[in-house]
Image (spheres, helix red, strand yellow):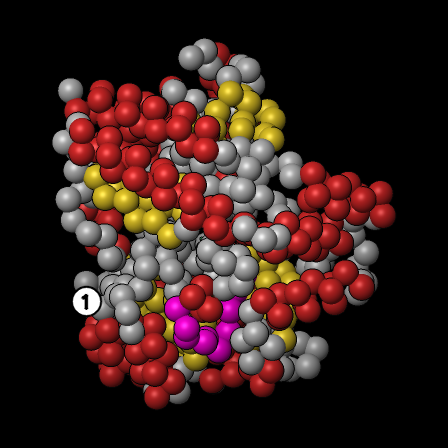
């Protein structure tokens, strides 16, 4: 495959843009390096790069593109909003409509506020929870990513009751010490953390179905116990549904797991590909937010007509009958094919899948938490990633990310992908 133009553009990008990319994982550091492919056009399930190569895309822009690239209904909504003025700085009718749509789909969000990213949404839920509880500490689960605000960019300590250490330079220790990290799917560690810090804990931050060390579902009863233990200690429960909302059903993961949080953060899919975030929750909690309450949060771009119109159009597409059945069917085809080929070439492969999202781990171990995902074979994944790219299959460049199917993918796309999987596995096995 000729990628000369990408090589040249990456060189140029490195001169002007820090690291040559505007988000670190795009630099392929997680897959042993290489030249990031510069894409030029995207339509449906496909990408075309600047050298004219075509790819089947499973990155889905890290999640938002569930309807496929350049979906006509969404594209039309965005184009119309461009001619109608993209930014007003005033309230609009569209915002009311979208807020109502979200509330109907996710009833625990009794009041909603739009922001510009998942990072902002999560960051603000924490501020509001702190304002509401008058406490400062937050418990999160190791390996779960909640955006890049200081507080949540904190890695695990050495034990369940240990305070966190910063995961990035530039985060004061004093901030990291407000975060306690415990393993996902481990009720006892969570209980211990609450026993030690309970009176100071404002909120527990949960990805109800994990998307950030691959797709990992909670064990039966785990989330209900987290809710009960947190509430008994007077802490709020925040669900980060930036990846999960509208991913597996028209609604939220809280619907699927049957547990209701106090607050929810959204992003990705609800913008149909344009920048957005939203948060919401119980009325008495949300009334902490300015202008009603003392917790300040604002945004020049928040609720801008383009993002809102795009989000409404995306949800309209997803609401059509058969959306999630189709994603599930394609996902099952992909999962079964990958596992069949792994068996043929005697490779240690596990696939975690829910509907149209799956993660391929090179391991013999079931993956239920971050530590197990971390222990899966990263070198093998890196080789697999590059082999698949050579075959025209664009995966996320990290062993921790999911493959995201869209409604634009076809059975033929899956068959073509599985041919590439077989070829890549054959090379890996030799
Ligand atoms: N929360 C989760 C679960 C995420 O996966 C992400 C991004 O990947 C975020 C929050 C941050 O969202 P954004 O990148 O829109 O700031």
- Where is 218 relative to 308, above or below? below
User: At 22% across and 22% down in the image, what residue appears?
Assistant: 426
User: At 34% across and 83% down in the image, what residue appears?
Assistant: 228
- Where is 349 relative to 430, above or below? below
For the question of whether residue 84 can be seen, the reply is yes
User: At 19% across and 52% down in the image, what residue appears?
Assistant: 366
- Where is 423 relative to 96, above or below? above
Q: Position of residue 123 (x, y in %)?
A: 51, 64
Position of the N terminus, as image quadrant, is top left
* Circle 1 SS class: loop
**Is residue 119 covered in magenta?**
no
List the residue tagged with mark 1. 159
Residue toward you, 427 or 370: 427
Residue toward you, 389 or 114: 389
Residue 111, quarter of the rendered image: bottom right
Q: Position of residue 84 (x, y in %)?
A: 85, 48
For the question of whether residue 117 can be seen, the reply is no
Residue toward you, 236 or 245: 245
User: At 46% across and 28% down in the image, what residue appears?
Assistant: 412
Q: Position of residue 271 (x, y in %)?
A: 62, 52
- Magenta region: which residues? 257-266
Residue 277, quarter of the rendered image: bottom right
Q: Position of residue 289 (x, y in %)?
A: 62, 77
**Is residue 260 covered in magenta?**
yes
């Amino acid at each position: 495959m000729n990628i000369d133009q990408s090589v040249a553009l990456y060189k140029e990008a490195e001169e002007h843009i820090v690291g040559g990319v505007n988000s670190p994982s795009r630099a392929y550091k997680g897959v042993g390096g290489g030249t990031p492919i510069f894409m030029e056009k995207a339509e449906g399930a496909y990408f075309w790069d600047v050298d004219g190569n075509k790819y089947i895309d499973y990155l889905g822009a890290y999640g938002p593109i569930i309807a496929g690239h350049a979906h006509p209904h969404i594209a039309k909504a965005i184009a119309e909003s461009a001619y109608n003025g993209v930014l007003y700085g005033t309230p609009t009718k569209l915002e009311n409509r979208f807020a109502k749509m979200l509330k109907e789909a996710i009833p625990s969000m009794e009041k909603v506020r739009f922001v510009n990213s998942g990072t902002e949404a999560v960051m603000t839920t924490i501020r509001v929870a702190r304002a509401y509880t008058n406490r400062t500490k937050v418990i999160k689960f190791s390996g779960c990513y909640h955006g890049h605000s200081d507080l949540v960019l904190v890695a695990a300590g050495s034990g369940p009751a240990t305070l966190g250490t910063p995961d990035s330079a530039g985060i004061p220790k004093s901030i990291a010490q407000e975060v306690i990290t415990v393993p996902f799917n481990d009720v006892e560690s969570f209980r211990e953390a609450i026993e030690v810090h309970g009176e100071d804990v404002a909120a527990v931050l949960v990805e109800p179905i994990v998307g950030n060390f691959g797709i990992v579902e909670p064990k039966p009863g785990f989330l209900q116990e987290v809710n009960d233990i947190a509430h008994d200690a007077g802490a709020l429960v925040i669900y980060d549904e930036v990846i999960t909302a509208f991913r597996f059903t028209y609604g939220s993961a809280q619907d699927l797991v049957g547990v209701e949080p106090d607050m929810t953060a959204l992003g990705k899919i609800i913008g149909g590909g344009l920048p957005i975030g939203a948060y919401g929750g119980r009325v008495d909690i949300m009334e902490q937010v300015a202008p009603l309450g003392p917790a300040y949060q604002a945004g020049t771009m928040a609720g801008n007509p383009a993002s809102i119109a795009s989000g409404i159009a995306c949800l309209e597409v997803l609401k059509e009958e058969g959306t999630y059945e189709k994603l599930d069917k394609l996902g099952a085809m992909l999962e079964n094919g990958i596992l069949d080929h792994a068996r043929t070439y005697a490779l240690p492969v596990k696939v975690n899948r829910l509907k149209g999202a799956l993660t391929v781990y090179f391991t013999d171990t079931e993956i239920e938490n971050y530590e197990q995902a971390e222990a899966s074979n990263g070198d093998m994944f890196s080789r697999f990633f590059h082999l698949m790219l050579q075959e025209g299959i664009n995966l996320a460049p990290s062993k921790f990310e999911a493959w995201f199917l869209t409604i634009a993918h076809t059975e033929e796309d899956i068959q073509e992908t599985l041919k590439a999987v077989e070829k890549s596995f054959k090379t890996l096995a030799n």
